[in-house]
Image (cartoon, helix red, strand yellow):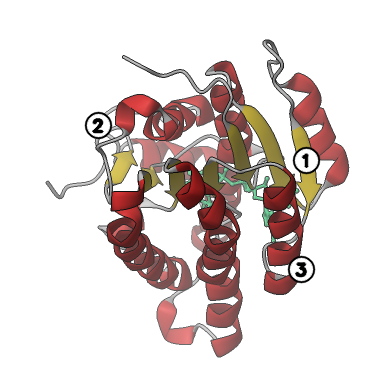
Amino acid sequence: MDLDLSGKHALVCGASEGIGRAAAHELALLGASVTVLARRAEALQAVVDALPARNGQRHGRITADVSQTNALADKVGALAGERRIDILVNNTGGPPGGPVASATADAFLQAFTRHLLANQALAQAVLPGMQAAGWGRIVNVVSTSVREPIQGLGVSNTTRGAVAAWAKTLSREVASQGITVNNVLPGFTETGRIAQIVGDRARNTGKSEQQVADGMKATVPAARFARPEEVAAAIAFLCSPAAGYINGVSLAVDGGRMQSI
Ligand SMILES: NC(=O)c1ccc[n+]([C@@H]2O[C@H](COP(=O)([O-])OP(=O)(O)OC[C@H]3O[C@@H](n4cnc5c(N)ncnc54)[C@H](OP(=O)(O)O)[C@@H]3O)[C@@H](O)[C@H]2O)c1
């Protein structure tokens, strides 16, 4: 199986911690040069310093806020002009929780800006290079809520559905150019995001965080949370040459939690 990404350049967003950081690591292990993007320069530099580098791999970082669409497009467009970006991992922090009935217009606008508009700006920055090369990979880190909305994550559920529809549409537009667009749907994964969700649920229910976490794990057939590198492995595989005929899919990495087939 051809998993070799030597000579490829990947841009991994939301990579200062969590699933994005783990994805940067897996892609570097497969031989890619990786540019990591997030808001915190110091944390990003620590990620760059820890990435495996051999055979001339050149890693770097971009400090950017995905909610600033125009500045994001300018920065990534400049990078793509200097060094073609062959692989784009669209990823950022998840929207705050809460029921959809009381969600504000501003909460929707913020979530759509950080997820949908950022993905669109990033894709537009990298696609010309991918089209010229006749090869490219775009992987969007979304959520199992694409298929089964999660109670208490109203704005997130809504935004994820839009991202999945966007990705499916794009996948069909660029498939004949050697470019694939896929989604990875993480289940409960041990990162800052899951700690935030557990903390919110504990505060809202009066349960301890341990009780909340145990209750969540009880809904997972695997009976545990995922490690970030388990989600990252799926991302890296979809970016590999071996995955060239997998396009427009939403791959759940959820320990079997979703009920739907
Ligand atoms: N963990 C789970 O259980 C789980 C389950 C389902 C779905 N997901 C989804 O998967 C994605 C990644 O989750 P995660 O658990 O890895 O999250 P995380 O640990 O909270 O990491 C989020 C990353 O995104 C970056 N980020 C946040 N806001 C940003 C912004 N405005 N501009 C640029 N970068 C930004 C953060 O870096 P900076 O702070 O340095 O910017 C960080 O590197 C999220 O969409 C999350 O909702 C996670």
Q: Earlier in the sequence, mark 1 or mark 2?
A: 1
Q: Is residue 123 visible from the viewing direction of this image?
A: yes
Q: Which mark is residue 34?
A: none
Q: Is residue 234 left or right of residue 27?
A: left
What residue did someone put label 3 on? 71
Q: Is mark 2 within 8 Å of ligand 1?
A: no
**Mark 3 or mark 2, which is nearer to you?**
3
Q: Residue at x 47, y 40 (%)?
A: 213
Q: Secondary structure at mark 2?
A: loop
Disc 3 residue type (three-letter): Ala
Q: Is residue 188 left or right of residue 194?
A: left
Q: Earlier in the sequence, mark 3 or mark 1?
A: 1
Q: Secondary structure at mark 3?
A: helix
What residue did someone put label 1 on? 61
Q: Residue at x 74, y 65 (%)?
A: 74
Is 220 rendered above or below residue 259?
above
Disc 1 residue type (three-letter): Arg
Is 105 rendered above or below residue 22?
below
Q: Quadrant of residue 12?
A: top right
Q: Nearer the viewer, residue 245 or 135?
A: 135
